[in-house]
Amino acid sequence: MILGYSNLYAADATERTLPDPSAARRLLLERRPDIPARIEAMVQRATAGAGSPQHADAALLGLCRLGLRHGAFGQDPHDYHNEDHVLELAERRLGRVMDGLGDTGLPPADWLALLLFAACHDLRQRETFDVPGPVRGNEAASIAETFRILATCGFDPARDRELFVAMELMIAGSTFDARPLPHADNGDLATAAGGSLARSLGLWLDGERPEWRADAHARRGERLARLAADLDTANVGEDFHLLADSAMRLCRERERRAGRAWTGRPARPPAWVS
């Protein structure tokens, strides 16, 4: 589509194990029978009851792939990037945005794109090579797999280009730079902002794909990327117990990914602020 990542990352064993929505639903029936109804309810809410099964199928397939690859359904469990992270975005946080804006605050297609973003933006977490520029390998590979998920669920890249482009830019924009500010790569201000790439995605596209602003689908995708990134990082605005829970899960995942044993004991005495 816009960025050209779709052919750079091939299908893996997880995709072959869960090739289609039927396989995903069978897995959920065995392991998490609560999930299909919850995702389908969000689709129906987003469309005032007029949703097609394609969107639910794609969201469930993405959720199951993540759950098998990095969640409770497989052998490489991640504390944060797993099927429950999909639900906290697709159900709790997206639901809260809908509560605030009203169910008709965005067009149904926008709500559905955000729902699919929740299911697919973290599909890959262990990619070993990056693409040029600020988008990381995990996100680029997740874009490639998302395109395959959409095609498997009956979406067409030409007929449904608006959705493909939105997914591409939303997932690219979810690339998170945790380095302390200020920093810049070779003076590139588009990658100097830190946090989610979405905040400077338009600036980066201006340099890399200057024609993007003439593309209505790309302009929509860039706009949705900013909202999607807010959903992804919205733990900072949730109730404190939810913020603390997500912070602990992310900390445990980072420690385990770094090869450090998680003991649950603090590394140093707590600092108390009165």
Image (cartoon, rainbow, N blue to C red):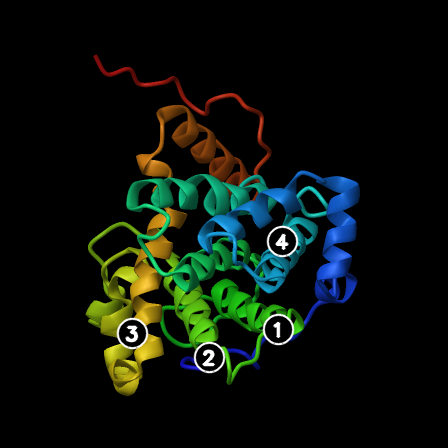
Q: Secondary structure at mark 1?
A: helix
Between 245 and 40, the residue placed more toward the observer is 40
Distance between the alpha carbons at the discs numbered 2 and 3: 13 Å
Number of callouts in the render?
4
**Mark carried by residue 265:** none
Q: Which residue is labeled 3 in the image?
A: 219
Q: Position of residue 243 (x, y in %)?
A: 39, 31
Which amino acid lies under the numbered mark 1 shown in the image of this protein? Arg
Q: Is residue 258 above or below residue 120?
A: above
Answer whether labels 2 and 3 touch (C-beta < 8 Å): no
Distance between the alpha carbons at the discs numbered 1 and 2: 13 Å
Between 269 and 110, the residue placed more toward the observer is 110
Residue in the image at 46% along x and 29% along y? 245
Q: Which residue is labeled 1 in the image?
A: 148
Image quadrant where one finds the N terminus: bottom left
Where residue 62 sits, quadrant-wise, is bottom right
Q: Which residue is labeled 4 in the image?
A: 66
Q: Is residue 19 left or right of residue 239?
A: right
Q: Is residue 113 above or below residue 8?
A: above
Residue in the image at 58% along x and 48% along y? 39
Where residue 172 sits, quadrant-wise, is bottom left
Residue lying farthest top? 274
